[in-house]
Amino acid sequence: MSEKQKYYITTAIAYTSGKPHIGNTYEIVLADAIARYKRIQGYDVFFQTGTDEHGQKIELKAQEAGITPKEFVDNVSTEIKRIWDLMDTSYDKFIRTTDEDHEKQVQKIFKKLFEQGDIYKGNYEGMYCTPCESFFTESQLVDGKCPDCGREVQPAREEAYFFKMSKYADRLIEHINTHPEFIQPVSRKNEMMNNFLLPGLQDLCVSRTSFKWGIPVDFDPKHVVYVWLDALTNYITGIGYDADGNSTEQFGTLWPADLHLIGKDIIRFHTIYWPIFLMALGLPLPKQVFGHPWLLQGDGKMSKSKGNVLYADELVDFFGVDAVRYFVLHEMPFENDGVITWELMVERLNSDLANTLGNLVNRTVSMTNKYFGGTVADKGAAEEVDADLKAVIDGTPAAVDAKMDGLRVADAMTEIFNLFKRCNKYIDETMPWALAKDEEEKDRLETVLWNLIHGISAGARLLEPFMPSTSKKILEQLGGGHVTEKPEILFQRLDLEEVMKKVEELHPPVAEKEETASDEAVIDIESKDEITFEQFGAMQFQVGEIIACEEVKKSKKLLCSQVKIGSQVRQIVSGIKAHYTPEEMLGKKVMVLVNLKPAKLAGVLSEGMLLCAEDAEGNLSLMVPEKAMPAGAEIC
C-alpha cells in the first residue's frame, strides 16, 4: 500500500457491574490479535474499547456498596482497564460512557433525533405487574395474568420517549440482504432476520424515569437516556462525532467502522438498533459486525454466585500472559462455543507450548551453539527433504492471511503451529546429532540448522499478533542465524496434580449438608383434577440441551433459551431469571415439554416449556436427567 488504508475495530464496551471474567476478557484479546495482524499487513489501525457505566443495575450496586454510582464505576472501570493492560492488548482508546464529551454528544444525538421526529414522547400503556415492574400488552398475557410471574395485572401507564424503529426496518432488511458480509457468522444473520426483523419491529423505549444514574435528557431532565442509545453511540463519539455537524477529521477518516467485535448475546442491539440509529443520523453503517461465541467453563457454567468463575489475572499467575492468550484464541471455534478448564490449560501448555514450540526453539539454539559456536549460514547442501519444509514455510503466510481475512483466528493459529510441527518433524528426518558425527556432513548439518532457524523465525513473526511476547523472545534468541549463547525456556511444563492442588487451595469446595430421608423437607400442594393415561400420552417430553441463553430485555423474570432437541433447535422462554443466569444455563441438559402450543411471552416467541421443581420459598430448580442422556432422548 502506497498510502496506509485505515482499519477501525471496536469491542463492545464492558459493563461496569463487576470484574470481568475470562469469557469477557476473551473479546479484548481477540480484537487485539486482529488489530495487531492488520497493523503488520500495513493498515493504519485504530482500536477502541472501554466501559459502559450507566443503568439501574449499577445504581443499585452502588447503593449496596454504600458509595456513589460514579465512585462505583470508577473502581470497576479501573479494574477492567488493568485486566486489559495485563493481557498485553494494544488498544488506541479506552472510552468511558461517563466521559464528559461522550455524555454531551449523547444529549445532542437524543435532541437531534427528537427534533427530526424519530424520537417521540409517549407512554408505556398496558397491563402492569407491580411485583415485576413491567408492562404487557393484552396479547402478551397468559390467561389474563402476568406472563412472568402469573400474578394479577392492572391497567397503568408511564411516560417515556420512544424511537420509531419500524420507520427504518425495510431499509435495514434491504441492507442486510445486499451486504452478506455485514453480519457474521451467517447463522447470526438468519436469527436476526427471522426472529426480529421479518416479524416486524416495535418502537423502542429510549428513556427511563425509574432511576437516575444515566445521562439526563437535557430538555426533559426527569428522563435519562436508556442504555442502548447511550452505550452504542460510543463507537462514533469516541472518534470525534458531533451531532451539530462539527465532527473531527479523525471521525471523517475512521467512520464507518471496519469491524464491531461483540458477543453473540448482544448481536440484536448491534445489527438492528445500532444500524437504525445510524440511518436516522444520516451516517453509513459499519462494514461488519461479528458476533463471536462464548467461552464456557467446563460443563458450561461460569457463575459468580457459584464461586467458579475464572479470571484472567488468576490464570496469568499460573500460566503466564501469552499462554492464556494462546488458549483463549486457539480453543475458541469460529461459530460454536469454546470450553476452558484448568485441566485443558495444563494439557495445552505442556503439549503445544512447552513441547511443540518451546522444545523446538530450545533444541535448535542448543545444537547451533554446540556444533557451530552459535552462528550458522545456508551452505547450500540441500536434500530432497528440505523442499517440503520450505514449501510449508513459504505457504504458511498466505494460509494465515486467508484465515484471518475470514476472522477465523483459531484456524490461523493452527496454521502457524503446523509450521512448528513440521520443523519438529524435520529434525527427526535429518537427525542433526547423527550428521555431527561425520565431518564430511558439516555443510549439510549447518544447512539443516539454518533451515530450522529460518522456519522457526518465519513462524515466530506470524505469531506476533497472537503471542507478542513469545514472538519477540523467539526472534531475539534466533537472531537471523546468530543465536543466543543459552536458550531461554519459553514455557515451563506443569504437573496437573500440583496445579489442581493449588486451585483447590485458592477455591476450596463449598461443603454441602447431606440430607437424610428423615430430615429432608417435604411439601404438600393442592391436588389438580385427575387425567387419563391417554391425556398424559398426548404430552411429549424430551431431553434438550441449552446451547444459547439470554435475558429478555423487556422482562425482569424471563430468560430466552435456544434448546437443541434432536436435530432441531427450539426457542423457549422461561420465568427463571431470578434463579439462573444465562451463563449458568449454557450446556445444561434439561427436561422439555415439546408439544406445548407456541406462545409469545413479553413479545418473544416460546416453543415449549422447561420443567422445574419449586420449593415452599419459591426457589426453582431445573429438572435434569440423573445420567448422561443425548439431546432428544424421550422422557417416558
Image (spheres, rainbow, N blue to C red):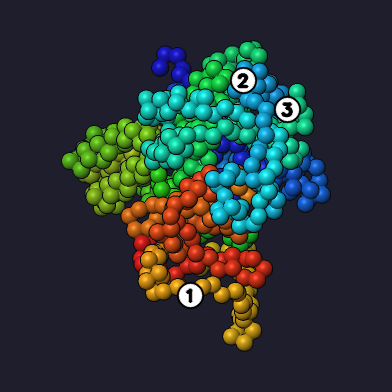
Question: Picture coordinates of residue 537 (x, y %)?
Answer: 37, 69
Residue at mark 1 to residue at mark 3: CA–CA distance: 57 Å
Q: Residue at x 47, y 67 (%)?
A: 624
> How many marks overall?
3
Query: Which is in the foreground here, disc 1 or disc 3?
Result: 1
Which residue was labeled with disc 2? 117
Compared to residue 294, the image places residue 98 above or below, namely above
Question: Picture coordinates of residue 547 (x, y %)?
Answer: 44, 53
Identify residue type, mark 1: Glu
Label 2, secondary structure: give it: loop
Residue 229 image-quadrant placement: top right
Q: Is residue 452 left or right of residue 28?
A: left
**Which numbered marker is on residue 217?**
3
Q: Circle 3: is it few (<14), some (14-19), or many (20+) Cα within 10 Å?
A: many
Which residue was labeled with disc 1? 530
Q: Earlier in the sequence, mark 1 or mark 3?
A: 3
Q: Is residue 35 left or right of residue 245?
A: left
Query: Which is in the foreground here, disc 3 or disc 2?
Result: 2
Q: Earlier in the sequence, mark 3 or mark 2?
A: 2
